[in-house]
Image (spheres, rainbow, N blue to C red):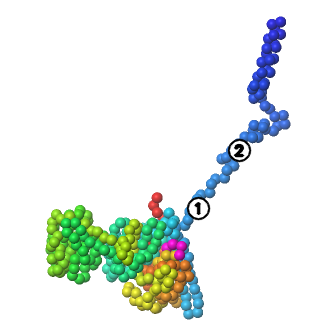
Amino acid sequence: MKSKWLLLILFISSIIVLILCPDAVEKTPADGHLSSDEENKAPDLETLTPSPSPDIQEPLYKYYTVVKNEPGFDLSMHVLEIDPANPRVEVRPVSSHATLFGYAFLSEISEKWEARVAVNGGFSHSNGLLGGMYYIDDELFVPGTGQYPVLFKRGEEFFFEDAETRIWIDGSVKLDSFYFNQYPKIEGLYVFTPSYGSQNRIRQPHLNAVVSSGEVRGLTMSSDSFDIPKDGFLISGIGEYAQKRLEAVEPEMNLEIFYEIIAGHEVIEGIDWAYECGSWILRNGEIVVPDADGWVGTLKIRTPRTAVGIKDDGKLIFVVADGRQKGLSDGLTGKELANELLALNVRDAAFLDGGASSEMIIEGEIVNSPSAGRERMLAAAFIIREKSR
């Protein structure tokens, strides 16, 4: 009897297990197919999902050529466009050396700055001193002349202005109306920063006030080139009147250089850099090119030209037109260049140095044909490179 009860209990227990735990029974497909659990299993994403394609980055620049071969006229023009909204691109003016004098080949400048692209810059004096406003890296290197348009970069914007600079020294005394980082040719008061060079290049009797770390260290007469302090600036007076003005400065006074960049009656602030060009070519889409320029003379003859401009869409554009080479390119007059720029949807533009200086380098190669058959040494250039991460 006990065995019957035991069998009954085991039978009932088995029924309960089957009802409550159906997975306890092994599932074996009879037809050789996978069980339903295996059929509904999520696929292996690693094997079925394609690898994401790498991000397509906007190129740093767009380069192309404009070629014309017409009866009596040939043109080879090299065009470079840069989008200021591209977060990878850096475009800036650079001088040939760390200080303001001297020259270098564009290929040397390009290599030094590890540039992807380089274009010849603007005008300079015979000693290599830049001919107009040059402001970059929070420092004013050369003041504006107030005679030519200045190209500015501010954030993701390029713009031109007729701008000038106001520079003064303030502190224990105030000084203004002086030449700033200019080669001394006439009598007057001069101020030199370390960016000018190691010495003031004055080789006639003059009075010097040495300002180091904001403090006047002393006044000294000299008849030869005088050292510029590396941690301050030098004030030099040539001529009786300038020296009398400088005598107001005394040892232990505190002095500092101040400056403003002004367009019209407004101070321009928040800029990344400023570079003075030659004459206007286009302004607000209108041809305003003169018949002559103070740097290059007549603009009525065809010659190699370099220009910088801003397109309707805000992109910066550089144009290098070859010239003086029959069968390849005759060059352009000022007005012909203006019309070529209008055809490229350029709104504002100004001249850079031209003639034998016109040159463009792309990825280490000179892409245009310099009119002298070789590179010409330059005082400054524009470089385009990828921003360092």
Can you tell which quarter of the image residue 133 is in?
Answer: bottom left
Left or right: residue 69 compared with residue 295: right
Secondary structure beneath label 1: loop
Give how far across and how far down residue 344 sits, in percent. 55, 79
Main SS type for the magenta part? loop
Give how far across and how far down residue 47 sits, in percent. 68, 48
Q: Against 25, is 289 above or below?
A: below
Left or right: residue 29 compared with residue 334: right
Pick the residue in front: 180 or 166: 166
Looking at the image, tell me whether mark 2 or mark 1 is earlier in sequence order: 2
Q: Residue under circle 1?
A: 56
Q: Against 205, is 84 above or below?
A: above
Residue pictured at 81% horizontal, 13% vertical: 7
Q: Residue under circle 2?
A: 43
Left or right: residue 86 compared with residue 134: right
Magenta extent: 312-316
Q: Residues within 10 Å of mark 1 (few under 14, many from 20)?
A: few
Secondary structure beneath label 2: loop
